[in-house]
């Protein structure tokens, strides 16, 4: 299957929101991280990240990261692109305490506060995606 970061962003965002409303903190939290990661990677493509033409995956190893490391990678692409000036993220990176391996953690390890923090980070990315679509940066 080919990679589609925009569709993956939307799917993970929508499912995370659904789970958040149902107080399913663990899976909502995990999906907020994935939504942010996929959204930022789609924006990184718009700002010049190289992807494999067949698979759509990033060609540079340092770009093959998850939510807790993609924030800094995004910034390197955004700051190097003329259109990126209007696509800044909040200064405080909300996914420093998020890790892909948390999908194996016990549900009791997650709280509304944790999920809400990651939701806010994903919401920032979601807003940038919508803006990029409206402004024609992402088609």
Image: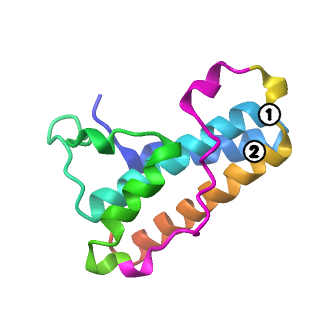
The 10 Å Cα crowd at callout 1, few under 14, some 14 to 19, many 20 or more, is: some
Image quarter of residue 32:
top right
Residue 126 in the image: x percent, y percent?
Answer: 55, 60
Q: Residue at x 30, y 43 (%)?
A: 62
Is residue 94 rendered magenta in the image?
A: yes
Region rendered in magenta: 85-105
Report the residue marked by disc 1.
Answer: 110
Q: Is residue 15 left or right of residue 53?
A: right
- Give the residue at the far left of this rendering: 53
The 10 Å Cα crowd at callout 2, few under 14, some 14 to 19, many 20 or more, is: many
Count every numbered label the image shows and give the total.
2
Q: Is residue 16 left or right of residue 136?
A: right
The front one of 66 and 10 is 66
Separation of residues labelled 2 and 1 (CA atoms)? 7 Å
Mark 2 touches mark 1? (CB < 8 Å): yes
Q: Is residue 138 visible?
A: no
Q: Residue at x 63, y 60 (%)?
A: 123
Q: Secondary structure at mark 1?
A: loop
Q: Is residue 58 visible?
A: yes
Q: Residue at x 63, y 54 (%)?
A: 94
The mark nearer the N terminus, 2 or 1, is 1
SS assignment for the magenta stretch, majority: loop
Residue 31 in the image: x percent, y percent?
Answer: 61, 39
Against 101, residue 9 (above or below) is below
Report the residue marked by disc 2.
Answer: 115
């Amino acid at each position: 299957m080919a990679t589609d970061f925009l569709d993956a962003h939307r799917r993970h965002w929508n499912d995370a929101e659904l789970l958040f409303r149902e107080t399913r903190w663990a899976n909502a939290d995990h999906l907020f991280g994935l939504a942010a990661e996929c959204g930022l990677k789609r924006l990184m493509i718009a700002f010049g990240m190289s992807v494999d033409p067949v698979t759509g995956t990033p060609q540079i190893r340092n770009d093959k990261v998850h939510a807790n490391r993609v924030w800094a990678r995004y910034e390197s692409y955004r700051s190097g692109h003329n259109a990126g000036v209007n696509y800044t993220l909040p200064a405080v990176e909300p996914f420093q305490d998020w890790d892909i391996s948390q999908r194996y953690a016990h549900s009791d390890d997650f709280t509304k506060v944790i999920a809400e923090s990651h939701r806010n980070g994903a919401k920032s990315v979601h807003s940038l995606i919508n803006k990029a679509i409206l402004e024609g940066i992402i088609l």
